Image (cartoon, helix red, strand yellow):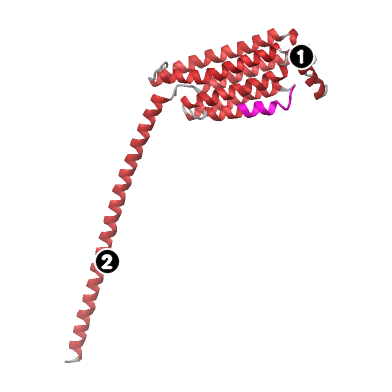
């Protein structure tokens, strides 16, 4: 066989191998495209399942949780608390309790409570006024949000929320009244923070779970204030005032 014939055969073989390579590349590409299509289809189906689960979860929350709370009610409650605390501070300063005296003098005045007996009625009036203003504001804003989102206000979830929230609050109120009756005014502010925190944590099972964090903060603040008897008003103002405002703004932005 001549050299030209060998070269022709060699060229044919080279062309054949190139053809095989091309076919293999096409096959691999088709396989990759097929796998990508399967993965894309699975991803779309998975995404649809996640959206369905999220929708079901939202429906369950609407039926099992009270979601008509408005974050602005917390903001207004905090403002009312700061106004009330400012008035009480001005009142106590007039009696010489919050002046430039030592911590020991403040503690003695609170523990003996002879001075506070004269204005206990006025202090209770301020507390009740702040509470009533906060409750009325919360009710108005809750009704407004419920109508906007077409949600029921009064149902089984609302009853559960009120029971779990009001029970610790009622026990704490009775406990604080006993402290006032015993003239132990120094422990009133810590007690209100602790029992209010317990009420929030308990009620958090039937509304936005974020409210539990506010409850934990109130409880912690109340416990800390037990070590600083005589300065309970400042802790009370921070807990019911500042924390309420911060919490209300966060909740309003998150669940607007």
The region drawn magenta spans: 218-229
Residue at the limit of the structure toward the bottom, as seen here: 1
Q: Is residue 219 left or right of residue 15?
A: right
The residue at which mark 1 appears reads as 113
The answer to whether residue 244 of the structure is visible from this angle is no
Magenta stretch: helix, strand or loop mostly: helix
The dot on residue 25 is 2
Q: Residue drawn 65% across and 21% down?
A: 191
Answer with the quarter of the image where residue 29 lies.
bottom left
Q: Is residue 239 left or right of residue 63?
A: right
80 vs 225: above or below: above
Answer with the quarter of the image where residue 79 lies.
top right
In this rendered view, identify the residue nearer to me: 132 or 15: 132
Q: CA distance from mark 1 to mark 2?
A: 92 Å
191 vs 25: above or below: above
Q: Residue drawn 70% across and 20% down?
A: 187
Upstream in sequence: badge 1 or badge 2:
2
Q: Quadrant of the N terminus?
A: bottom left
Q: Residue drawn 36% across and 28% down?
A: 59
Residue 221 in magenta stretch: yes
- The spot of residue 137 in percent (x, y) is 53, 15
Q: Rate crowding at label 1 as few (under 14), some (14 to 19) or many (20 or more) other CA atoms within 10 Å.
A: some
Question: Tags 1 and 2 in contact by the CB under 8 Å rule?
Answer: no
The answer to whether residue 7 of the structure is visible from this angle is yes
Q: In front: mark 1 or mark 2?
A: 1
- The spot of residue 7 in percent (x, y) is 21, 86
- The spot of residue 37 in percent (x, y) is 28, 52
Secondary element under disc 2, as helix, strand or loop, is helix
- The spot of residue 83 in percent (x, y) is 65, 16
In this rendered view, identify the residue nearer to me: 73 or 49: 49
Residue 125 in magenta stretch: no
Secondary element under disc 1, as helix, strand or loop, is loop
């Amino acid at each position: 066989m001549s050299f030209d014939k060998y070269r022709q055969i060699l060229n044919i073989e080279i062309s054949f191998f190139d053809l095989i390579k091309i076919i293999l590349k096409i096959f691999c590409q088709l396989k990759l495209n097929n796998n990508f299509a399967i993965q894309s289809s699975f991803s779309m189906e998975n995404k649809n399942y996640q959206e369905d689960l999220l929708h079901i979860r939202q429906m369950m929350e609407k039926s099992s949780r009270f979601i008509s709370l408005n974050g602005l009610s917390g903001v207004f409650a905090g403002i009312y608390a700061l106004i009330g605390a400012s008035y009480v501070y001005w009142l106590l300063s007039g009696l010489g309790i919050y002046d430039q005296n030592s911590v020991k003098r403040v503690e003695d005045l609170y523990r003996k409570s002879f001075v506070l007996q004269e204005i206990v009625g006025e202090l209770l009036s301020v507390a009740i006024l702040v509470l009533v203003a906060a409750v009325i504001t919360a009710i108005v804003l809750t009704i407004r949000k419920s109508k906007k989102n077409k949600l029921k206000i009064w149902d089984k979830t609302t009853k559960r929320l009120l029971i779990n929230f009001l029970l610790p609050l009622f026990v704490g109120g009775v406990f604080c009244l006993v402290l006032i009756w015993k003239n132990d005014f120094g422990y009133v502010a810590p007690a209100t923070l602790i029992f209010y925190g317990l009420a929030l944590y308990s009620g958090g099972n039937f509304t936005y779970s974020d409210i539990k964090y506010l409850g934990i903060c109130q409880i912690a603040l109340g416990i800390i204030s037990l070590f600083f008897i005589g300065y309970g008003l400042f802790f009370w103002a921070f807990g019911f005032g500042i924390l309420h405002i911060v919490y209300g703004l966060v909740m309003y932005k998150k669940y607007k």
